Amino acid sequence: MNPLGVFGGTFDPIHYGHLRTAFEMLQALRFFEVRFIPCGDPPHRGKTYATAKQRFEMTRAALAGQPGFVVDDRELSRDGPSYSIDTLHSLREEIPERPMALILGMDAFLGLPKWHRWLDILKVAHIVVAHRPGWRAPDIGPLGELLSRCGTHRIDDLHELTHGRIHIHAVTQLEISSTEIRELIEAGRDPRFLTPDPVREFIATSRCYGALDERFL
Ligand code: ATP
């Protein structure tokens, strides 16, 4: 059965690095769909810049009319820190039999041992890791051990099993980050071509990253 791809992030704001990664995964790993889940209250990152509602709206704007991409607000309506394990359990209740795969950039994967109940994630879902520029897969430590136990190169494993495998997948490398976009805006520059136009328009009208140069509008 085709897996559900689960892509969590702060998406502060969402950009083409996220979208292209998710699209390549959707196609190459033959996902049923990719569910984008903006984090309500990110436990590892301190504050966000735009509000949870604004980050959700930007994600929705970016995905509008894109087949195979769905935005999901479950972390926004839950109180307390947004732990991925809770999100995966709540999805699992809705789809008991379909494989699920949590999509992570390599930087996020390297931070996994700090996540709440991180080892339980593989009891509910697979993990697919996008190669991101400048990051190498670990071969030692807890993640190195986990990779040697659960790593797979076979995409079919992600379809035949509902959870429990880690697959590292190379994607087109777009060195875009939300931080860079926020810094550009702060410097009075335009994030055009780094994020879809509807997101850029939302940023301009909501002023969620501060007042913008009027050339944006
Ligand atoms: P920030 O600059 O604020 O840290 P970010 O651009 O890393 O943000 P997040 O919302 O924190 O974006 O990332 C969500 C997920 O997307 C993470 O798993 C991260 O590794 C991945 N990701 C972010 N940017 C890229 C990119 N350019 N290419 C591939 N994956 C990415």
Image: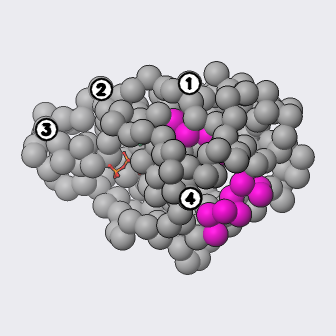
* Circle 1/circle 2 CB separation < 8 Å: no
Q: Is residue 110 left or right of residue 25?
A: left
In the depicted view, which residue is nearer to us: 180 or 211? 180
Residue linked to disc 4: 142
Q: Residue at x 64, y 69 (%)?
A: 117
Q: Residue at x 18, y 48 (%)?
A: 183
Q: Residue at x 38, y 65 (%)?
A: 45
Residue linked to disc 3: 189
Residue linked to disc 2: 193
In the image, farthest residue toward the front: 140
In the depicted view, which residue is nearer to us: 187 or 3? 3
* Circle 2/circle 3 CB separation < 8 Å: no
- Specify which label sits upstream in the sequence, 3 or 4: 4
Element at label 1: helix
Mark 3 vs mark 4, CA separation in Å: 42 Å
Mark 4 vs mark 1, CA separation in Å: 28 Å
Q: Where is residue 146 in the image (x, y as percent from the top left)?
A: 63, 52
- Specify which label sits upstream in the sequence, 4 or 1: 1
Magenta part of the chain: 117-130
Q: Where is residue 113 in the image (x, y as percent from the top left)?
A: 53, 63
- Indicate how the structure is coloured in the image: one colour
Residue 121 within the segment the image draws in magenta: yes
One can see residue 128 in this view: yes
Residue 153 within the segment the image draws in magenta: no
Q: In this view, does 146 lie to the left or right of 215?
A: right
Element at label 4: helix
Element at label 2: loop
